[in-house]
Image (tube, coloured by chain):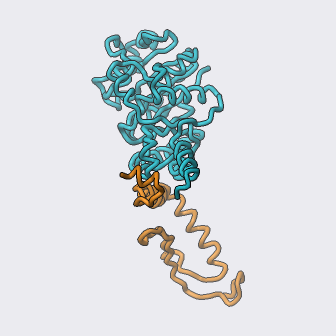
Amino acid sequence: MELINRLLGRQTPPGSKDVARERLRLVLVQDRSSIAPSLWGALKEDLLAVIRRYLEVDEDAVEVELEREGEAMALVANIPVRRIRRASGQDTE
Amino acid sequence: MGEVIVITSGKGGVGKTTTSANVGAALAAQGRSVVLVDADIGLRNLDVVMGLENRIVYDLVDVVEGYARVRQALIRDKRFENLCLLPAAQTKDKTAVNPDQMRGLCRELREEFDFVLVDSPAGIEQGFRNAIAGAEQALVVATPEVSSVRDADRIIGLLEAERMPAPRLIVNRMRPAMVRRGDMMDIGDIIDILAIELIGVVPEDEAIVVSTNRGEPAALLPTSRAGAAYREIARRLLGETLPIAGSAAQEATLFGRLRRLLGAR
């Protein structure tokens, strides 16, 4: 039946391989991030290097992590701000 | 000085041992001297797949512990005199060997053979560490399933951490009919996810079961499709550039082209 449908070019329900591929993609984002802790340290440092030019933040309280939001992965950073610098790139202390 | 290649996968049951036996036999059929090293200590199996289980006197652990010389432990294949097996111990476990001993063993074997193929156990613990210790190249075997591809990704990460240069992928048990109806990931999907070089695609083939029953590698059967795929992998290891023919990806495209020709969707 399925073969006849296909030969006639009728739309058959999508196969399970797209589901497999999508699930794999998501799980590998999690796997790879959890087994590379050095990646997080380096990312945090680089982020802070940029943010420091504009904001004064509580660097000890910075949290950077991946969160799964339904079908997508998001990089979520929680960075408490102490004060905003008056002009970008300058220390106005 | 020969090449030391580890065959590994992370997940069990995806065909590491079958791949080792068949690629080894195919390389031997090409006239190269080959030694197969069964690094799955405690779960010896390469011997039965090769049909050499009745000839074992000494094993890998006897060699590294100094009870036997390598020469005494090697078993010569029935079909090719340039193909040998170094069997695993069956009564010990993986802690009976350490990575330094494996490095020494591989160094010794590569003096004598063109290819040293190390059949790795499943898992990522000491058995895997031992298997990769003496190797300079890796072939990662995966089937087109979520669990197998995920484990392959983990293994590739571990190999990279060990500074193993670019492991190459063998996709095993591909079922073109399932790929065509969209129920199995195709080669493109898997390569896209794992981002490593492909060295071969082995179709699911009943001849593998039959040849394993008999202890005769399918790579030596002219009629087996899996056997043909293993022969191609061997030729690629020898440096030939062959299109990955019979790959499900290609067949899928062919089918698609045919369908378009017929005016369907």
x, y (%) of residue B97? Answer: 39, 28
Above or below, B140 relative to B62? below
- Give above or below for B237 relative to B166: above
Give the image location of residue B225, x and y in percent: 47, 29
* Quarter-of-image position of residue B87: top left
Please say whether residue B213 is visible from this viewpoint. yes
Q: State the residue in front, B152 or B78.
A: B78
User: Which residue is nearer to you in this view: B5 or B146?
Assistant: B146
Would you say B182 lies left or right of B113 here? left
> Can the viewer see residue A31 in this picture?
no
Chain shown orange: that is A
Q: Residue at x 38, y 49 (%)?
A: B147
Q: How many numbered callouts?
A: 0
Chain B colour is cyan
> On the rendered image, what quadrant is the C terminus of chain A found in?
bottom right
> Which residue is the extreme one toward the bottom?
A86
At 37% from the left and 14% from the top, the residue drawn is B67
Residue at the image position 36 percent from the left and 14 percent from the top = B58
For the point 58% across and 37% down, the residue is B244
Where's residue B177, x and y in %?
A: 43, 44
Give the image location of residue A48, x and y in percent. Answer: 60, 73
Direction from residue B86 to residue A41 in the image, left or right: right
Query: Compared with residue B190, is residue B206 higher up or lower down, i.e. above or below?
Result: above
The foreground one among B217 and A31 is: B217
